[in-house]
Image: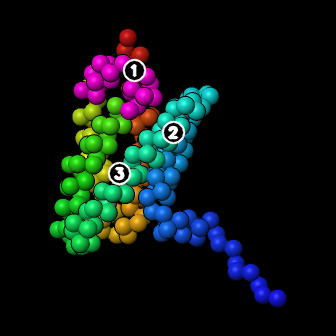
């Protein structure tokens, strides 16, 4: 009697999927992490009943846009820079990411969140973006270049979107709690 091969661990199965189906795996990972981040954010901000529609819409945005966009962006950068990881190349990658993908991600998310998730009229969303987008992006620029540096210098290509999604998990919680504190401060000021 032959023995059956040992069962793969969850991590081994995940890594196998990442290797066999990188785009799909990164999209699903980004979506799941975004959804969990939103559930945590809702709980920490005092929402009693989880807003499932909001969670689902965030999963769709992250899985449908953020994960795939990150996958293609990182793949393109690695091809363009021929996989180099020297200091000058890493700096160029970080600068490119921070001047292209980062502002685009934040802008599109703010539009999506306002129009799709909150169902706010476009004119109000546009006004909110004019007021808050610069602060959000400037805050991101104080934090995400370090993440980018670590990502491009030390993380293999196939794990970069995953690292970014993990960091975005905490970034999403931070932004939600920050927005809540600003809302509470405005309410007290009135």
Picture coordinates of residue 120 (x, y %)?
39, 20
Badge 3: how crowded within 10 Å, few (<14), some, or many (20+)?
Answer: some
Query: In what element is the residue under mark 3?
Result: helix
Image coordinates for residue 63, horizontal then vertical, percent: 46, 47
Where is residue 78 drawn, in percent x and y? 27, 67
- What number is the disc on residue 152? none
Q: Is residue 173 above or below residue 132?
A: below
Q: Give the spatial CA distance, label 1 vs label 2.
A: 19 Å
| Left-right relation of 68 to 40 | left
The N terminus - image quarter: bottom right
Label 1 sits on residue: 120
Residues drawn in magenta: 112-130
Residue drawn at x 34%, y 69% as measured from the top left? 154
| 59 vs 27: above or below | above
The question of residue 120 being in magenta is answered with yes
Does label 1 or label 3 sit earlier along the sequence? 3
Find disc 3 in the rendering and name its residue.
69
Give residue 45's position: percent from left, percent from top: 52, 31
Q: Is residue 43 above or below residue 3?
A: above
């Amino acid at each position: 009697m032959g023995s059956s091969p040992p069962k793969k661990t969850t991590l081994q199965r995940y890594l196998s999927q990442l290797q066999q189906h990188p785009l799909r795996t990164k999209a699903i990972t980004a979506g799941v992490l975004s959804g969990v981040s939103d559930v945590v954010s809702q709980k920490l901000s005092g929402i009693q009943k989880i807003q499932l529609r909001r969670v689902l819409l965030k999963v769709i945005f992250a899985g449908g846009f953020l994960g795939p966009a990150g996958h293609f962006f990182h793949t393109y950068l690695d091809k363009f820079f021929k996989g180099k990881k020297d200091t000058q190349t890493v700096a160029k990658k970080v600068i490119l990411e921070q001047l292209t993908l980062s502002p685009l991600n934040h802008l599109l998310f703010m539009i999506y969140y306002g129009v799709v998730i909150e169902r706010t009229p476009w004119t109000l969303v546009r006004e909110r973006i004019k007021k808050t987008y610069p602060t959000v992006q400037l805050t991101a620029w104080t934090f995400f270049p370090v993440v980018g540096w670590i990502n491009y210098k030390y993380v293999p290509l196939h794990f970069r979107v995953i690292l970014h999604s993990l960091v975005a998990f905490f970034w999403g919680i931070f932004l939600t709690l920050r927005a809540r504190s600003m809302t509470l401060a405005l309410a007290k000021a009135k």
